[in-house]
Amino acid sequence: MSNHSCNYLLFRCMDFRLKPSVLNELLEVIGCSEGNFDLVSVAGSAKDLLSERQGEKEFLLKQIELSSKLHHICKVIVLLHDNCGAYGIADKDEEEETQKQDLAKIEKIIKNNFKDIEFDGFIVKNTSTGDLTLKKV
Ligand SMILES: [Zn+2]
């Protein structure tokens, strides 16, 4: 059991426009290679860590806990993306600003709950056109 390890846990939105083949190429560039990360794909990515509904938050925390316990991850990577239905913000700049603030809050929650786990946050841009790029936050 102890040799079943990977480096990262990746949170992404379930949105079909974030094509795995395209996304994996971008992730490869930041060192997050296919076969080296656990994957949580849910609406809004890790947004529900900020949910007022305790169950939603706990569901996501449990994924981190299990990924850490079973696969000894050293880092959580959270991808938010533009034009996200879970955010439902029409104005691009307003959406980006909200997502940046959310990533900062998400980082705090993860660090408060998991002392030894690092964090990286990104926003995937150009979801509408399919010409995906990663923006580090
Ligand atoms: Zn989305």
Image: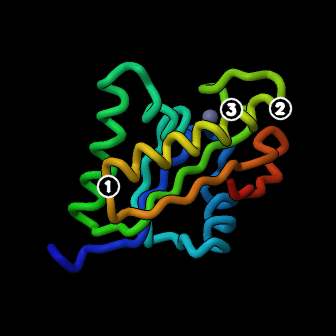
Mark 2 residue crowding within 10 angstroms, few (<14) / some (14–19) / many (20+): few
Q: Earlier in the sequence, mark 2 or mark 1?
A: 2
| Residue projecting furthest to the left | 1
Seen in the picture, residue 10 relative to 28 is either above or below; the reply is: above
Q: Earlier in the sequence, mark 3 or mark 2?
A: 2
| Residue under label 2 | 92
Nearest-to-viewer mark from 2 and 1: 1
**Mark 1 to mark 3 CA distance (whole Å):** 24 Å
42 vs 136, nearest the viewer = 136
| Quadrant of the rendering where the N terminus is positioned | bottom left
Disc 2, disc 1: CB below 8 Å?
A: no
39 vs 62, nearest the viewer = 62
Disc 1, disc 3: CB below 8 Å?
A: no
Residue 74's quadrant in the figure? bottom left
Amino acid marked by disc 1:
Phe
Quick check: which quadrant has ligand 1?
top right
Residue 53's quadrant in the figure? top left
| Residue under label 3 | 98
**Mark 2 to mark 1 CA distance (whole Å):** 32 Å
Q: Position of residue 4 (x, y in %)?
A: 25, 74
SS at badge 2: helix
Amino acid marked by disc 3:
Thr
Q: Does the numbered disc 3 mark a residue whose Cβ is under 8 Å from ligand 1?
A: no
| Residue under label 1 | 114
Q: Does the numbered disc 2 mark a residue whose Cβ is under 8 Å from ligand 1?
A: no
Apparent side of residue 1 relative to residue 85 in the rendered image (left or right): left
Q: Earlier in the sequence, mark 1 or mark 3?
A: 3
Seen in the picture, residue 58 relative to 104 is either above or below; the reply is: above
SS at badge 1: loop
Going 61% across and 64% down the picture, which residue do you hit? Answer: 24
Going 49% across and 49% down the picture, which residue do you hit? Answer: 107
**Mark 3 to mark 2 CA distance (whole Å):** 10 Å
